């Protein structure tokens, strides 16, 4: 299956650098509007532009792509993420729900205690 550009990863990498969209757009030679459409899923970059983005962000261009698997799930090219996805898929439904609730809590709060409490609460209600 053909790899798909990972706009979420692009946004995360840009934010990790502390750059605004306009800053990355200037570094890679595209308009801010074009970069905004890419990050919002309205369009995909050319392979050449994706390569320039990867170089500016200091990552391998392959890490900006994911490959859909036949069953519709996404597989990442990043080794750590691939390992996590594989481990998640092997969990029982109950543990998978807990891990998902914990992960979403961490993403929202970036606080392990708050995320853990939210996940425990989710599992109690369920």
Image: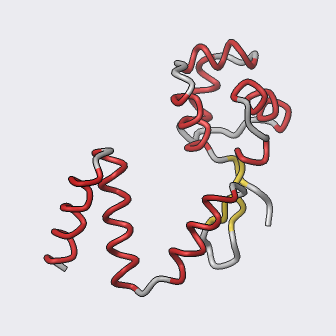
Residue 35 higher or lower than 9, as above or below: above
Q: What residue occupies the far right of the structure in this picture?
A: 48
Residue lying at 83% horizontally and 38% vertically, measured from the top left: 47
Task: Tell me where residue 51 appears, x and y as whole percent.
Answer: 81, 33
The picture quadrant where one finds residue 12 is: top right
Residue 27: give x, y in percent of width and height: 71, 15
Query: In this image, 22 relative to 52: left or right?
Result: left
Q: Nearer the viewer, residue 120 or 44?
A: 120
Quadrant placement of the N terminus: bottom right
In this rendered view, identify the residue nearer to me: 123 or 80: 80
Figure quadrant of the C terminus: bottom left
Q: Is residue 106 left or right of residue 25?
A: left
Q: Is residue 97 left or right of residue 14?
A: left
Q: Position of residue 59 (x, y in %)?
A: 74, 37
Tell me the residue at 78%/28% (across/down): 55
How has the structure been colored for display?
secondary structure
User: Total number of numbered labels?
Assistant: 0
Residue drawn at (70%, 40%), measured in percent from left and top? Answer: 44
In the displayed structure, does residue 118 sit left or right of residue 68?
left
Which quadrant of the figure has residue 78? bottom right
List the single residue furthest toward the front.
Answer: 113
Q: Position of residue 84 (x, y in %)?
A: 56, 66
User: Outermost residue toward the bottom?
Assistant: 92
Establish if 125 lies above or below 76: below
Q: Looking at the image, which residue is at 73% across and 24% down?
A: 56
Q: Quadrant of residue 113?
A: bottom left
Q: Is residue 60 above or below residue 69?
A: above
């Amino acid at each position: 299956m053909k790899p798909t550009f990972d706009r979420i990863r692009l946004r995360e990498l840009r934010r990790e650098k502390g750059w605004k969209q306009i800053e990355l757009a200037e570094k890679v030679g595209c308009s801010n509007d074009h970069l905004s459409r890419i990050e919002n899923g309205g369009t995909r970059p050319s392979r050449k532009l994706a390569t320039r983005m990867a170089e500016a962000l200091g990552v391998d261009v392959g890490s900006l792509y994911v490959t859909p698997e036949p069953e519709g799930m996404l597989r990442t090219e990043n080794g750590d993420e691939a390992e996590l996805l594989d481990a998640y898929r092997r969990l029982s439904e109950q543990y998978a729900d807990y891990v998902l609730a914990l992960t979403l809590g961490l993403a929202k709060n970036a606080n392990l205690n708050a995320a853990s409490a939210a996940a425990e609460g989710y599992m109690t209600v369920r």
